[in-house]
């Protein structure tokens, strides 16, 4: 069983590595550096400008909510697969050792994540909220202990039916941790005390109710959900074969669909009826428009608009290859050049459509008509660079 | 003469699957491409439709090869795959429109033809549906409609009889007959040897990537030495080593 875990883990890590290579492509790293830089700069400015506020007031509760959300970052990864329900059932009695291995793996990974986030929050606690070191240590300790317990809860839920009930679950993973965190913020040591009691009660619960059976369907469903959200994330950067969305008719949108030429006809329908590409485009367009609305500094707006526009354009590139595995794409007596041209034009239209929203948002935010015009020009130049030289390079690189 | 395959050597990788295959499909002929699973039928078809590049040999349609006159070559082929392949986001109507655009067909006459075919295959009230959600047989009918509205000189039909109901099978055979009399030629791969024997003008038998023999049923019977042998008997005999 331990061997099985090891091979599964190796395969999983290999898969992560494979997709991370796509996520961390050279262009995204540059964008990421910008974003991180901007974040760090803004954060330090914020820390300096806000200064000490002794009246915690409602911030306290915001912190509790924030930490609670953070607490649920990173799930219990069992790496179980659909077929396991058939193939591993005969060895169910040995599954506990597998699941424990999985538990400890999740613990190490998620504690690392928690710690990293807490370190980022540390200056905020210290400088802005004026927490004492003891208080911070208590919060960190409670947070980390709670994380291990929430994972433990998932492990126990695999074998104890009552823990799979929603009410019980909400109490154990949301309510009690919320109380522990609140207490840790107000009276550090009391938070720790309650957390220890929580741990003991889970322990007792395990002693009393533990069975050697395993809720296969529950575990597999959980794992599939976890993998799906992971794939969704990777899908922002590259094609993930496990994510296939079915087309929806959306008849009410028929009026915007072009009737020709042939590949514009096809790609436009793909965009409108399948959310595979258009969902992201819409999301980034809306997000970009909203963010630009709140930024009054034109330089910053420019950089953000360029990044958003780039992300949208770059995301759309794989759409061109979507029908590569449909034999008719190769059989039609249409040259590849023609198809590429039709795709480029459609992509250009999509980008210009988005740009108009961005520019209007800037116009509203800065109230400068010149900013508006300048934004249109700058984005227009980027569109051209994306659709002509960059897409050409992309096509060459991806055969 | 329509399709001419000369000394074709080819396959998916460096190791050739097809070894020196030559045959012809003449104008107005229905030729059956016969072979066991893995004999090389699909590989041969993939070479003809241009998905694979021959390592040696040549394939021409009306004298055009894929390399000398790509557009003409592609225009003269209509292909019906064994497993239906559809655009997930297009309705049945849009599949037909797409075909019309891609092959630059005259719109009204192509739609006339399409309406007729849709009626034959009882799909006329499904125009606004996604064929991707149809059953296998219905998907196959969509493929047939799209193929038969073109003005192709050569129809390549890969294993058409599995999945079609008896009525549709009959309709397809009628359709082929009609196109043949219009001067088109048809290359059809199949395992349903009894139907093939009844309808095909000639046969091309391949085994292990090699051409076993080709000819009319009478020629094959003569070659096999049993004047009353069925196609199935001849094929089994030949592939198992006795006979020729």
Image (cartoon, rainbow, N blue to C red):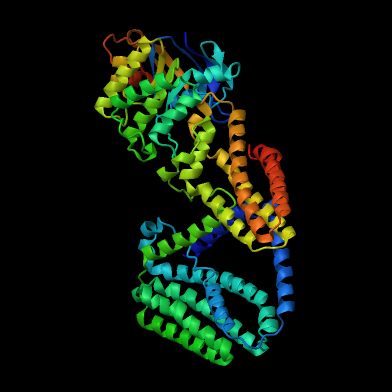
In-front residue for pair B108/A336: B108
Residue placed farthest to the left in the image? B167
Name the quadrant containing residue B149: top left
Question: In this rendering, would B228 be left or right of B184?
Answer: left
Name the quadrant containing residue B130: top left
**Count of numbered marks:** 0
Residue ID at (63%, 49%): A355
In-front residue for pair A11/A323: A323
Residue A123 appears at what percent x and percent y? 69, 79
Q: Is residue A356 visible?
A: yes
User: In the figure, A86 relative to B115: above or below?
Assistant: below
Question: In this rendering, would B192 be left or right of A201?
Answer: left
Residue ID at (53%, 18%): B73
In-front residue for pair A151/A167: A167
Q: Quadrant of the C terminus of chain A?
A: top right
Question: In this rendering, would A298 be left or right of B128?
Answer: right
User: In the figure, A147 relative to A74: above or below?
Assistant: below
Residue ID at (34%, 11%): B224
Residue A376 appears at what percent x and percent y? 69, 48
Name the quadrant containing residue A336: top right
Residue B218 appears at what percent x and percent y? 32, 8
Q: Is residue B241 visible?
A: no
Residue A324 appears at what percent x and percent y? 53, 36
């Amino acid at each position: 069983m331990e061997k099985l875990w090891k091979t599964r883990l190796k395969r999983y890590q290999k898969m992560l590595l494979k997709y991370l290579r796509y996520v961390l492509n050279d262009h995204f790293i540059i964008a990421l550096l910008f974003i991180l830089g901007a974040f760090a700069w803004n954060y330090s400015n914020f820390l300096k400008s806000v200064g000490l506020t002794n009246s915690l007031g409602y911030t306290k509760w915001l912190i509790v909510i924030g930490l609670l959300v953070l607490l649920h970052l990173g799930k219990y990864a069992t790496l179980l697969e659909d077929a396991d329900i058939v193939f591993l059932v005969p060895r169910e009695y040995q599954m506990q050792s597998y699941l424990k291995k999985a538990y400890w793996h999740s613990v190490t990974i998620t504690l690392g994540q928690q710690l990293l986030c807490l370190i980022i929050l540390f200056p905020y606690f210290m400088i802005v909220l004026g927490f004492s070191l003891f208080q911070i240590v208590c919060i960190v300790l409670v947070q980390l202990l709670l994380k291990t317990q929430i994972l433990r809860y998932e492990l126990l839920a695999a074998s104890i039916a009552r823990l799979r009930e929603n009410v019980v679950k909400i109490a154990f993973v949301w309510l009690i941790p919320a109380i522990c965190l609140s207490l840790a913020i107000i009276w550090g040591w009391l938070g720790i005390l309650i957390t220890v009691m929580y741990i003991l009660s889970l322990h007792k619960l395990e002693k009393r109710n533990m069975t050697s059976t395993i809720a296969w369907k529950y575990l597999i469903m959980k794992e599939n959900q976890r993998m799906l959200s992971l794939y969704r994330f990777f899908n922002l950067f590259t094609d993930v074969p496990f994510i296939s969305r079915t087309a929806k008719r959306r008849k009410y949108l028929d009026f915007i669909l072009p009737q020709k030429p042939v590949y514009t006809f096809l790609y436009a329908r793909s965009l409108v009826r399948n959310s595979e590409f258009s969902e992201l485009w819409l999301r980034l367009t809306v997000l970009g428009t909203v963010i630009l609305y709140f930024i009054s500094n034109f330089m910053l707006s420019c950089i953000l608009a360029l990044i958003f526009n780039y992300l949208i354009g770059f995301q759309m590139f794989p759409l061109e290859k979507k029908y590569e595995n449909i034999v008719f794409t190769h059989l039609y007596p249409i040259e590849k050049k023609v198809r590429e041209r039709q795709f480029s034009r459609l992509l250009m239209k999509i980008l210009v459509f988005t740009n108009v929203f961005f520019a209007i948002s800037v116009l509203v935010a800065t109230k400068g008509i010149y900013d508006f015009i300048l934004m249109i020009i700058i984005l227009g130049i980027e569109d051209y660079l994306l659709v002509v030289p960059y897409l050409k390079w992309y096509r060459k690189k991806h055969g | 003469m329509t399709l001419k395959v000369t000394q074709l050597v080819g396959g998916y990788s460096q190791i050739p699957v097809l070894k020196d295959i030559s045959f012809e499909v003449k104008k107005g002929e229905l030729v059956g491409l016969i072979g066991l699973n893995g004999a090389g039928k699909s590989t041969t078809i993939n070479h003809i439709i241009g998905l694979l590049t021959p390592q040696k040999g040549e394939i021409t349609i009306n004298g055009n090869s894929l390399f000398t006159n790509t557009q003409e070559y592609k225009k003269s082929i209509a292909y019906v795959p064994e497993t239906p392949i559809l655009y997930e986001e297009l309705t049945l109507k849009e599949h037909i429109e797409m075909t019309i655009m891609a092959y630059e067909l005259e719109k009204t006459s192509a739609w006339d033809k399409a309406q007729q075919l849709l009626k034959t295959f009882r799909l006329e009230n499904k125009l606004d549906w996604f064929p991707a959600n149809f059953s296998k047989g219905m998907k196959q009918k969509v493929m047939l409609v799209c193929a038969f509205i073109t003005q192709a000189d050569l129809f390549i039909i890969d294993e058409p009889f599995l999945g079609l109901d008896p009525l549709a099978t009959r309709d397809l055979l009628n359709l082929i007959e009609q196109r043949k009399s219009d001067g088109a030629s048809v290359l059809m791969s199949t395992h349903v040897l009894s139907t093939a024997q009844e309808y095909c003008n000639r046969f091309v038998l391949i085994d292990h990537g090699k051409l076993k023999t080709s000819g009319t049923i009478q020629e094959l019977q003569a070659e096999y030495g049993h004047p009353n042998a069925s196609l199935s008997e001849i094929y089994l005999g030949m592939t198992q080593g006795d006979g020729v």
